[in-house]
Image (tube, helix red, strand yellow):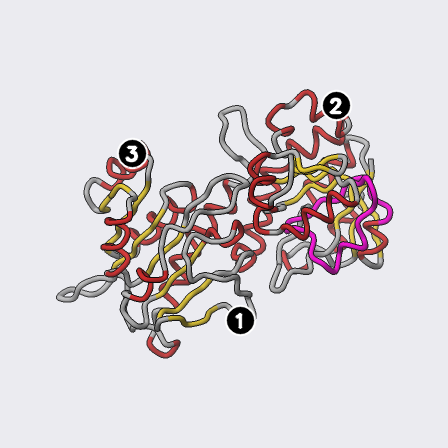
Amino acid sequence: MIIGVPREIKIGETRVSMTPALCRRVTALGGKVLIEKGAGLSAGFTDDEYKAAGATFAPNAAKVWKSADMILKVKEPLEAEYDLMQHGQTIFTYLHLAAGPALAKELCRKSILGIAYETVEGVDGQFPLLKPMSQIAGRLSIQIGAYFLQSQLGGSGMLLGGIPGTMPGHVVVVGAGNSGAHAVQMAAGMGARVTVLDLDTRKLEALDNEYRGRVVTLMSNPANIEHEVADADLLIGAVLIPAAKAPIVVSEKMVARMRPGSVICDIAIDQGGCIETIKPTSHTKPTYKQHGVIHYAVPNMPALVGRTSTMGLTQATEPFVAMMVQKGVERALSEHKGLAKGVNTRNGRITYDAVAKAVGFDS
């Protein structure tokens, strides 16, 4: 099997889908790695390291796509890569098709076997390939929010941790999954007042036990969300329904009631976002203002810490990549039900019900 590793082309993307350590594992199992020159540099990995691990190099992305049996990526293929995809090829990456119907259509047109990181399941029913990036995005959301709250950036000038004799900033986190829980951890660590809302009482109980009253936990319902959002200095959207489009839980009317200079960071933007006024931004233009509120919604937020993100992601993908190299893709899918859950497109059809519903295709 030839695994192709093209350079990521999304704006500001610094991650790479394969480290030299993973490359060494693949070649030891009999696989071949074809990597685009310089693909790992932004994450701190040199071509010499890949060469020592057994990789061969392609001068450009077109050569990688044309020669590989399976393409290993970080982000979903962009429009500029559509013509490079080969009919019947396997692509293993974050696909996020619920927010990308055009890509879904193209994958089907070319009969791509699209295996999405975000829907691969572990033996516990969790999502091991989504988890590390969710954790990073959750932690980063607080750093980013604190930064854009600064006065010179148009923020309200609120210091999240405050100082003695002043009120700390109020961080409101909607969603208590992996990303939300890590946002709570960072916000509480900075000394902010933290409120977290979720529909799952078990998640709220776990956070209440962990923080022993230092974090307010509330059921997620329109009345509670409306009240807390109006008082938020930093609002974190962290609602996730695996593979499906994120539901809108914060309305434009609620956003309009926020204090001028408040900040919104929507971690759910990969799946369309959970805040009505949100739209995707980029690392070159990360924010915009609406109703006087700063909105941040960069889909590839973990690229801000490319090396940490690459290490976290590849540690999670390695067992699945190794399995497919050792057994072949089809056998691996037949033997590992959790990996098979990652299949979003096959033989010209969308095979994951939540994705099909989100993009309006038949599954």
- What secondary structure is marked by label 1? loop
Between the residue at mark 2 and the residue at mark 1, the CA separation in whole angstroms equals 44 Å
Residue 108 sits in quarter: top right
Label tally: 3
Mark 1 — residue? Answer: 285
Instruction: Specify few, some or many for label 3: CA neighbours under 10 Å numbering under 14, 14-19, or 20 or more.
Output: some
Residue 222 belongs to the span the image colors magenta: no
Judged from this view, the residue extending furthest toward the left is: 165
* The C terminus: image quadrant: top right
- What secondary structure is marked by label 2? helix
268 or 128: nearer the viewer: 268
- Whether residue 22 is situated above or below residue 172 in the rendered picture: above
Name the amino acid, label 3: Thr
Residues shaded magenta: 66-89
Instruction: Specify few, some or many for label 2: CA neighbours under 10 Å numbering under 14, 14-19, or 20 or more.
Output: few
Name the amino acid, label 1: Lys
Residue 74 belongs to the span the image colors magenta: yes
Between the residue at mark 2 and the residue at mark 3, the CA separation in whole angstroms equals 39 Å
Mark 2 — residue? Answer: 331
- Whether residue 130 is situated above or below residue 146 in the rendered picture: above
350 or 184: nearer the viewer: 350
Name the amino acid, label 2: Arg
- Whether residue 204 is situated above or below residue 270 in the rendered picture: above
Mark 3 — residue? Answer: 201
